[in-house]
Amino acid sequence: MKALATALCAALLALAGCSSPPQRVQPLTAPLPERLAVPAGYTLVWSDEFDRDGLPDPARWVHDTHRNREGWYNKEAQYYSDRRAENAVVQGGQLHITARREALREQPDWGGQPYSSARLITKGRGDWTYGFFQIRARLPCGQGTWPAIWMVGSGGRWPADGELDILEQIGERPDRVFSTVHTQAGSGAWGSGAERTLTDVCTAFHDYQMHWTPTHIDFGIDGVAHYRYLNHGGDAWPFDRPQFLVLNIAIGGDLGGRVDDSIFPVTMAVDHVRVWQAGSAR
């Protein structure tokens, strides 16, 4: 994320990390697979198909609200609500995370934010070390939006426990999507990652994928890999311990930038979240 992110995230609590898109793209360090797909011998160990209407399943998802009063990282302008259908609801087989232009002054932890949104995490409901992850989603559009599908270390130490950004995008450049890895050896603006151009991420669903192994991590979309991160050990590889998943829409801030108030409400629709692992790995 921006250079400011490292300082802001020093106070990171155990419930959250700081999503951090790349400021410079590092070269690929190894050949990419011909196709990114669930490997043979992997078993589905966790999923949400969003097949029951209502609020997100509390057995799978926690609403992360811990920075509402203080304000969220990277100068973001949203308030993350807690179990509020206007911001996160399952309807018609999909999870809808919606950001709105509204000031929720009646909320006891409101920190003056002019927008509402939701940030769902699986911490304590689903934490994994290694596996194949697939999230099928359609992204929101509009100047100032910053949707993300990512993972952060369950230990709560950022960046020492690492961060894996499966997908991030900004409304200012809706055709630009990117994946990034953040560690103690390379965090914030120094994260390692790659970009990809897709023209229909705001109108069509895509499978956003990551294959995390003890030796490398591959990122891709619809079975096509665009980045491989290798295990170089030390501070560059904290990825031998659990991480949890995060789904959110941030508004404005260092990366989201100027916000066009005419766009709201905007929604990220998620068709499914699936996690496969080899054997009994957890």
Image: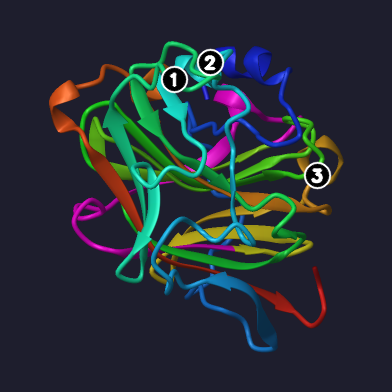
Q: Is residue 184 magenta?
A: yes
Location of mark 1 (residue)? 76
Closer to the camera: disc 2 or disc 1? 2
Dot 3 crowding, Cα within 10 Å, few <14, some 14–19, many 20+:
many
Q: Residue at x 64, y 15 (%)?
A: 8
Position in image of residue 4 (x %, y %): 57, 12
Distance (Cα) linking label 1 and label 3? 27 Å
Q: Secondary structure at mark 2?
A: loop
Location of mark 2 (residue)? 71
User: Which sits earlier in the primary sequence, circle 2 or circle 3?
Assistant: 2
Q: Is residue 241 magenta?
A: no
User: Which sits earlier in the primary sequence, circle 1 or circle 3?
Assistant: 1
Q: Residue at x 67, y 83 (%)?
A: 43
Q: Secondary structure at mark 1?
A: loop
Residue that protrudes farthest toward the left in the picture: 262
Marks 2/3 in contact by CB < 8 Å: the verdict is no
Q: Residue at x 43, y 11 (%)?
A: 112
Dot 2 crowding, Cα within 10 Å, few <14, some 14–19, many 20+:
some
The residue segment tinted magenta is 183-210
